[in-house]
Image (spheres, helix red, strand yellow):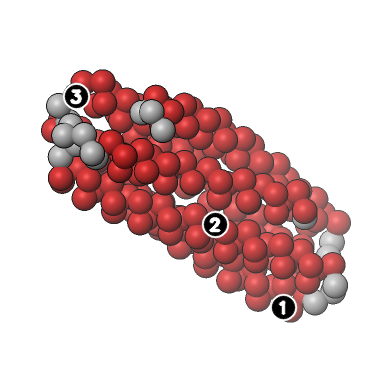
């Protein structure tokens, strides 16, 4: 379970990358190459990104608490917390969907950026962030399945159900690794913006 907690925490760090894009664009906004409408859209993207990070942190904290409650034999409390974590995970997914819509709007605004160097770099960063958000959405689905399976495993305490939890954990870890790879690419693009 501790491994699961670490994995969920790493995903929260990934979404920080979206905030770095917003920060980079904010720094670049001092240049005349970024139009006002573009800046307004990236502020909206920043809001959704912050919400995703916050909710992911909330889910991570709840999973840590679920682990403790399960080990203490406080199964009813653990089950209630799983339901809460699942709701928060669903809300994080909705915020990620809103972030993807904001990224679409940012992409539409690229034509108004006059500097071809800035436009190209921002395009590549947005493209990478799109892929990252897509993988994050897939991750939230896997995390939801993980939470459902964990719920069953706590209720039944059957070895087969605990093994199923481990199977979902492997899936979540695989998706997390892909997200980490995309995040590294994204951070490299943000680095090209001089941040």
Under circle 2, the secondary element is: helix
Under circle 1, the secondary element is: helix
The residue positioned 80% from the left and 50% from the top of the image is 163
* Residue that mark 1 sits on: 77
Q: Is residue 125 above or below residue 71?
A: above
In this rendering, would 14 be left or right of 95? right
Q: Residues within 10 Å of mark 3 (few under 14, many from 20)?
A: few
Eye-nearest disc, 1 or 2: 2
Nearest the viewer among 79 and 50 is: 50
Between marks 1 and 2, how big is the CA–CA gap?
Answer: 20 Å
Q: Residues within 10 Å of mark 1 (few under 14, many from 20)?
A: few
* Residue that mark 3 sits on: 115
Q: Which mark is residue 56?
A: 2
Q: Earlier in the sequence, mark 1 or mark 3?
A: 1
Between marks 3 and 2, how big is the CA–CA gap?
Answer: 36 Å
Q: Is residue 70 above or below residue 54?
A: below
Nearest the viewer among 94 and 121 is: 121
In this rendering, would 113 be left or right of 189? left
Where does residue 83 sit, x and y in percent of width and height?
A: 60, 71
Q: Residues within 10 Å of mark 2 (few under 14, many from 20)?
A: many
Where, quadrant-wise, is the N terminus in this rendering? bottom right
Nearest the viewer among 155 and 186 is: 186
Question: Quadrant of residue 170 in the image?
Answer: top right
């Amino acid at each position: 379970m501790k491994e699961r907690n670490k994995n969920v925490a790493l995903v929260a760090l990934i979404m920080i990358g979206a905030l770095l894009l917003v920060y980079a664009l904010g720094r670049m906004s001092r240049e005349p190459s970024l139009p006002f409408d573009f800046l307004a859209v990236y502020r909206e993207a920043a809001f959704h990104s912050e919400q995703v990070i916050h909710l992911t942190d909330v889910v991570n904290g709840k999973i840590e608490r679920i682990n403790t409650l399960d080990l203490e034999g406080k199964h009813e409390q653990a089950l209630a917390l799983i339901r809460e974590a699942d709701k928060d995970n669903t809300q994080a997914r909705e915020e990620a969907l809103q972030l993807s819509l904001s990224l679409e709007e940012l992409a539409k605004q690229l034509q108004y950026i006059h500097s071809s160097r800035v436009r190209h770099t921002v395009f590549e960063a947005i493209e990478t962030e799109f892929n990252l958000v897509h993988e994050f959405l897939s991750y939230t689905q896997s995390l939801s399945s993980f939470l459902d399976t964990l719920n069953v495993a706590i209720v039944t305490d059957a070895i087969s159900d605990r093994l199923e939890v481990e199977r979902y954990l492997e899936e979540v870890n695989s998706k997390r690794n892909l997200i980490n790879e995309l995040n590294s690419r994204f951070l490299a693009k943000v680095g090209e913006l001089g941040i």
